[in-house]
Image (spheres, coloured by chain):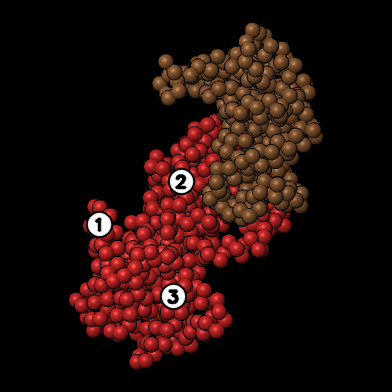
């Protein structure tokens, strides 16, 4: 354990040294240390908690799971948020100053150059050390799991990128794939195997913590393999690997073209299929949306792992509600991500209904598939114990909320358009006036639904089991849709000058 | 109401205000089929406003715009079906590649996919965009962006082209390719309205000229009318200029352009 820790520390030091010597901007240094920081904070907090509690159970698995996903997500966020250089780029750069102590001096210089930001930068560098110390404490297997994930996820894009190349080699890929099956073969019960398979790698982490003897090590190997593959997959989604553009140019064609052809083959008219293909292409390339999508799909499964929803309809509603809440936000600022491209809607006199519909269908498809994934994940972990009517109500309510947001978003997007910086992952993509209007709109949706639930005599959680209650949000959403259609067209025509004056750089 | 004049594009007494500022004042002009009309004017003359009105991004406060006989306000889809626009701020979606941009414009412009693919390939080749065609457009240089916007305006093979400063920021080779493409479109019967601050380019390429100044049309005529007007304006002057330059400087006026700047080295005194 000590040797592994020293090795990890050396890797971390080398990384920082290279980042500093390569003369990266301040964000590069923060980036190099930032990903371990996120993981370190999580694990250190957990380690302290464990010292107090002296025991690991389902909560341990939950903490590990959160740490695992958080570290993957945050390492990718840091990589993109810097906007100037990733850790991988830092690693590839030529090291100009050489000699004893050059790295240390460079790092100190960089810290000084950060000015007031050293308040953040210094603990950023030091905190990973704390996590390693926490990992050495003799408190069950949790530190081992933390360290393993730190090695693979915490170091972020650098390791992912390096290992992504290795994984392409057939022997490495074969071995990795073989490791993936370990939890399914060695899980103590079928239910545990199913849990592991449905919410990997947190499920495997849970197995590792409860497995007897050396079989824990087997789960650890499997965990690393899953972590690696999921990390690479996430990296492929969030930031394109260096080889990707070459492959695309060799293959030719375009995502938009292929999607558009597919939709036309399904019988969709040419203009509508092009608009929908464009929306899907843009949304799936927008880093902020992809991250939100990842969170929307993963979070319900984590909540389910923490505690099965069972009969708790309200909890189920909240869990499923995460999906439309996270994913449908682009509905509230539809032209924001179009930028100057939005001019085409008017220069080519595209029908406003087709423009709006394309955006709504694109997001709707992603919300529905997200809800499907969330329901599937919850069902696999917790079973459909709430009864079909509760699940139906939750699903229909969430879908209706998306439609409602779409209807509100038609008006809000034309009344309060705002430019979106597509390279930023932080901040809101919805202008404050639009967010306020949307909040009022959400109150108008939730209020009548709750009133209807109370009106039938039973308090809301119990009344959610009545299947016909799902008709209330559905009617509300359909009504809002019908009411806003004509008005949104008039606003689209009338407010184009205002919208474009905001969107054009 | 339809326009029966036979013009590819016609503006009829168009007025546009931005608050207290009068950007266009009763502007009327016509672009006949197979003709390239050059729109010139100093900064703030209203050229871009006029282009934006024609392309549907701005609504005129009064007056009408006709494209191939269709009233752009009453029949916007019919009017813009045959209109290609390359505006000062290119209409490009940041997260699409150059190829996707062109394919999208072709698809919503009603171009059949095989024809669109052929046009995308040819336009990207002649404008030297092939290497970057599968890159996101937000990584393009200014010149590449202008060339891509120009190619996007052509990809639907429109019968009317509206080009606002199309040559700005484009290299000499690119300008030459653009001029040849426009010449081909013009010969095929397209009506072209093009603006530029480079008077020599407009003078070389266009056969009809419109001079806009502070929102009003100061001159509108063909080459012979331009030559006559230039002769009137330069009578008695020794300096030799192109006809368009003579009319521009003669009508727009402004500060003396030939005077030396005394505050700078070589200014004399």
Can you say which quadrant of the picture contains the N terminus of chain A? bottom left
Q: Closer to us: mark 1 or mark 3?
A: 1
- Label 1, secondary structure: give it: helix
- Label 3, secondary structure: give it: helix
Instruction: Please provide percent x and percent y for residue B106.
Output: 69, 45
CA distance separating discs 1 and 3: 36 Å
**Subunit ID for the residue under disc 3:** A
CA distance separating discs 2 and 3: 32 Å
- Residue in the picture at 53% in, 54% down: A283
On residue A340, the disc is none
Instruction: Please provide percent x and percent y for residue A249.
Output: 63, 60
- Label 2, secondary structure: give it: loop
Query: What is the drawing colour of chain B?
Result: brown
Image side of residue B40 versus residue A303, left or right: right
User: Which chain is tinted red?
Assistant: A
- Residue in the picture at 50% in, 69% down: A233
Which residue in the structure is indicated by mark 2? A420
**Subunit ID for the residue under disc 2:** A
Q: Is residue A169 visible?
A: yes
Closer to the chain start, of discs 2 and 3, is: 3
Q: Residue furthest right?
A: B188
Closer to the chain start, of discs 1 and 3, is: 1
Which residue in the structure is indicated by mark 1? A112
On residue A227, the disc is 3
Instruction: Please provide percent x and percent y for residue A334.
Output: 51, 45
Crowding at dot 2, Cα within 10 Å, few <14 / some 14-19 / many 20+, comes out as many
- Residue in the picture at 45% in, 55% down: A288
Q: Kindly indicate whether the residues beneath marks 2 and 3 are on one polypeptide chain.
A: yes
Q: Kindly indicate whether the residues beneath marks 1 and 2 are on one polypeptide chain.
A: yes
Q: Closer to us: mark 1 or mark 2?
A: 1
């Amino acid at each position: 354990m000590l040797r592994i820790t020293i090795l990890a520390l050396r890797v971390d030091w080398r990384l920082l040294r290279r980042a500093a010597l390569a003369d990266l901007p301040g964000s590069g240094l923060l980036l190099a240390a930032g990903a371990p920081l996120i993981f370190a904070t999580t694990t250190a907090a957990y380690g302290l908690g464990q010292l107090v509690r002296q025991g690991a159970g389902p909560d341990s698995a939950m903490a590990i799971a959160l740490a695992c996903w958080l570290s993957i997500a945050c390492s990718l966020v840091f990589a993109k948020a810097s906007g100037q250089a990733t850790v991988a780029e830092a690693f590839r750069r030529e090291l100009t100053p050489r000699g004893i102590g050059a790295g240390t001096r460079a790092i100190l210089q960089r810290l000084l150059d950060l000015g007031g930001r050293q308040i953040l930068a210094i603990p950023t560098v030091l905190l990973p050390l704390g996590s390693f110390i926490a990992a050495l404490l003799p408190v069950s297997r949790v530190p081992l799991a933390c360290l393993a994930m730190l090695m693979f996820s915490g170091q972020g894009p650098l390791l992912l990128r390096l290992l992504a190349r290795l994984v392409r080699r057939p022997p490495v890929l074969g071995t990795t794939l073989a490791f993936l099956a370990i939890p399914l073969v060695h899980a103590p019960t079928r239910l545990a195997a199913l849990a592991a398979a449905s919410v990997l790698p947190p499920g495997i982490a849970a197995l590792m913590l409860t497995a007897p003897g050396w079989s824990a090590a087997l789960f650890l190997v499997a965990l690393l393999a899953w972590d690696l593959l999921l990390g690479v997959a996430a990296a492929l989604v969030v930031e394109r690997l260096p080889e990707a553009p070459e492959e695309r140019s060799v293959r030719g064609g375009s995502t938009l073209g292929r999607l558009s052809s597919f939709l036309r083959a399904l019988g969709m008219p040419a203009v509508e299929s092009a608009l929908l293909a464009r929306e899907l292409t843009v949304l799936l390339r927008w880093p902020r949306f992809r991250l939100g999508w990842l969170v929307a799909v993963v979070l319900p499964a984590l909540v389910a792992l923490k505690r099965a929803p069972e009969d708790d309809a309200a909890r189920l509603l909240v869990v499923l509600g995460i999906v439309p809440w996270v994913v449908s936000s682009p509905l509230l600022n539809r032209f924001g991500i179009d930028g100057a491209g939005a001019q085409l809607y008017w220069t080519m006199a595209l029908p406003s209904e087709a423009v709006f519909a394309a955006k709504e269908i694109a997001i709707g498809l992603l919300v529905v598939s997200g809800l499907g994934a969330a329901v599937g994940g919850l069902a696999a972990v917790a079973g459909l114990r709430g009864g079909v009517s509760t699940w139906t109500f939750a699903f229909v309510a969430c879908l209706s909320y998306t439609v409602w947001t779409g209807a509100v978003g038609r008006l809000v997007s034309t009344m309060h358009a705002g430019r979106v910086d597509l390279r930023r992952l932080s901040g809101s993509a919805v202008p404050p006036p639009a967010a306020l209007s949307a909040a009022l709109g959400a109150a108008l949706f939730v209020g009548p639904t709750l009133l209807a639930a109370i009106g039938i005599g039973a308090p809301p959680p119990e009344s959610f089991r009545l299947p016909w209650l799902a008709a209330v949000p559905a009617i509300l959403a359909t009504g809002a849709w019908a009411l806003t259609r004509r008005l949104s067209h008039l606003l689209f025509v009338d407010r184009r000058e205002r919208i474009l004056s905001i969107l054009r750089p | 109401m339809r326009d029966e004049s036979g013009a590819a594009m016609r503006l009829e007494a168009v007025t546009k205000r931005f608050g207290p500022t009068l950007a266009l004042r009763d502007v009327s002009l016509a672009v006949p089929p197979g003709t390239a009309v050059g729109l010139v004017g100093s900064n703030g003359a209203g050229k871009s406003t006029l282009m934006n009105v024609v392309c549907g991004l701005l609504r005129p406060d009064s007056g009408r715009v006709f494209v191939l006989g269709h009233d752009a306000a009453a029949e916007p889809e019919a009017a813009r079906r045959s209109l290609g626009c390359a505006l000062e701020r290119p209409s490009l979606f940041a997260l699409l590649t150059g190829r996707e941009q062109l394919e999208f414009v072709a698809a919503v412009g009603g171009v059949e996919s095989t024809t669109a693919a052929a046009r995308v390939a040819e336009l990207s080749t002649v404008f030297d965009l092939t290497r970057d065609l599968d890159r996101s457009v937000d990584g393009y240089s200014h010149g590449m962006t202008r060339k891509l916007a120009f190619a996007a305006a052509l990809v639907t093979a429109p019968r009317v082209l509206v080009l606002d400063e199309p040559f700005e920021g484009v290299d000499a080779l690119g300008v030459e390719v653009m001029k040849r493409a426009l010449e081909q479109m013009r010969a095929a019967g397209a009506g072209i309205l093009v603006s530029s601050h480079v008077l020599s380019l407009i003078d070389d390429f266009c056969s009809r000229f419109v001079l806009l100044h502070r929102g009003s049309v100061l001159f509108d005529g063909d080459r012979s009318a331009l030559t006559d007007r230039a002769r009137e304006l330069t009578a008695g002057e020794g300096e030799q200029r192109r006809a368009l330059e003579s009319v521009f400087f003669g009508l727009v006026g402004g500060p003396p352009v030939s005077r030396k700047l005394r505050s700078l080295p070589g200014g004399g005194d």
